Image: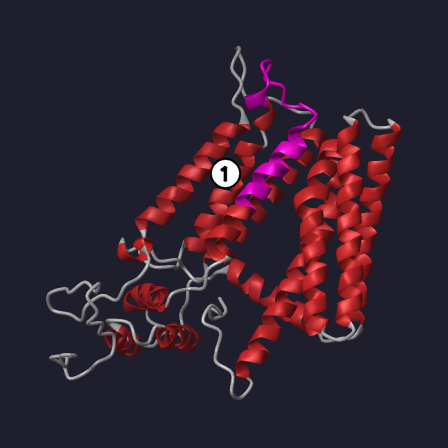
Amino acid sequence: MTTPSRTGRGRGRDDRPGAERRPGGDPLPRRGRLLRLGVARDTSAVRHLVTFLVVSVATVLVTRFLLAASGYPQVGGGGLHVAHVLWGGLGMALAVVVLLSWVGPVLRSLGAVLGGVGFGLFVDEIGKFVTSDNDYFYAPTAALIYAVVVVLVLLVEALHGRRAHHPAEYLAVATDRAVAGVAGGFTDADRAEARSLVERGRGEPGADEVAALVEAVPRDDEVVPDPVRGLVRRAASWCAGALEHRWAAVVVVVAVLGTAAGALVVGLRVVRGDVDVPTWVGAGILAAVAGTVACVVAGLLVGAGDHRAGAVWVRRGVLVSLLVTQLLAFRAVQWVAVAGLVVDLAVLAALGVALGRDDERRAERPGRGRREDAAPRS
């Protein structure tokens, strides 16, 4: 028999035998071990992690370009050489200092940028780490750097893309937003975002108290500039507007097939022996290109009756290109493969926006529940 709560509210109570009772509050419902340890995922984590990875890759490319343009100068003298891996370590250390020095989400974008610059400078010298003669120009370096980034992307996907957010995580993030608000106030947009997070955390212990805290935060129009967040919002808005046009699907398909055609040329050159890399690299490129083309064809066939299903198939083709084709292309032609990588990333981002908008529209239809894992825009 259920015992009424002392506060008269049943929200958040769990009287099952497995529930943990805590002094002064409702029992904690059963949940995953990480949540029981207080480890909640940030709903904006993907944006910060993508910023980190994009800045890392951009730093590698800019560093390589500047070094080549300046004749690969060395900083130091008298037998000393200050490698830029040391500056990379300094950048990552500064990122850690920033992220550990302040509470709340305000400086996380800055931490992601500093960490990205530092990691880019660090991983750019990977050739020196894996060769006995410290060869910065080691031929597979581009492929190794790309492989590292791919592994990190897969890690981000495993942490944030496969499991819906628990309501307690939304509530924890709302509290995190309120931390910044207590110190500096809320703009109207910040308060609306915090309210949305609280709504997604309803039913969890402490939800009413967090909602009251969000409403108690004073109003303030002065905000800390966040260029990364603004850029992401503008890019997403522009992309969403462009995708409303009928020609957008044609542009996406042409871009994917064009990138596949470029990779096909590279694969054929490798198989013919025109490029000094193992033949299996070319064979792998040809097989991956075939997989991408097959996915695009399936998307065109399926998309005639279901646009979303068609977009999902094209996205699969882009993922095959990113995870296999581009990795092998970097091994074959090194930095020349950057053009195909940029196109694939742009198409993947566009398809992500399109699928996200479709999810929002489906969730807003009468008679359909809201998606539990759809976080407020950040």
Q: Residue at x 55, y 38 (%)?
A: 120
Q: Is residue 235 above or below residue 146?
A: below
Q: Is residue 275 above or below residue 312?
A: above
Q: Nearer the viewer, residue 180 or 307?
A: 307
Q: Residue at x 19, y 66 (%)?
A: 17
Residue assigned mark 1: 118
Q: Residue at x 34, y 59 (%)?
A: 104
Mark 1 secondary-structure assignment: helix
Secondary structure predominantly adopted by residues drawn in magenta: helix
Q: Nearer the viewer, residue 362 or 47?
A: 362
Near mark 1 (Cα within 10 A), the count class, few <14, some 14-19 or many ≥20, is many
Q: Which residues are magenta?
A: 128-153
Q: Taking 90 as reference, is 288 left or right?
A: right
Query: Can residue 131 be found in the magenta stretch?
Result: yes
Q: Residue at x 31, y 66 (%)?
A: 175
| Residue sitting at the far top | 79
Q: Position of residue 53 (x, y in %)?
A: 55, 47
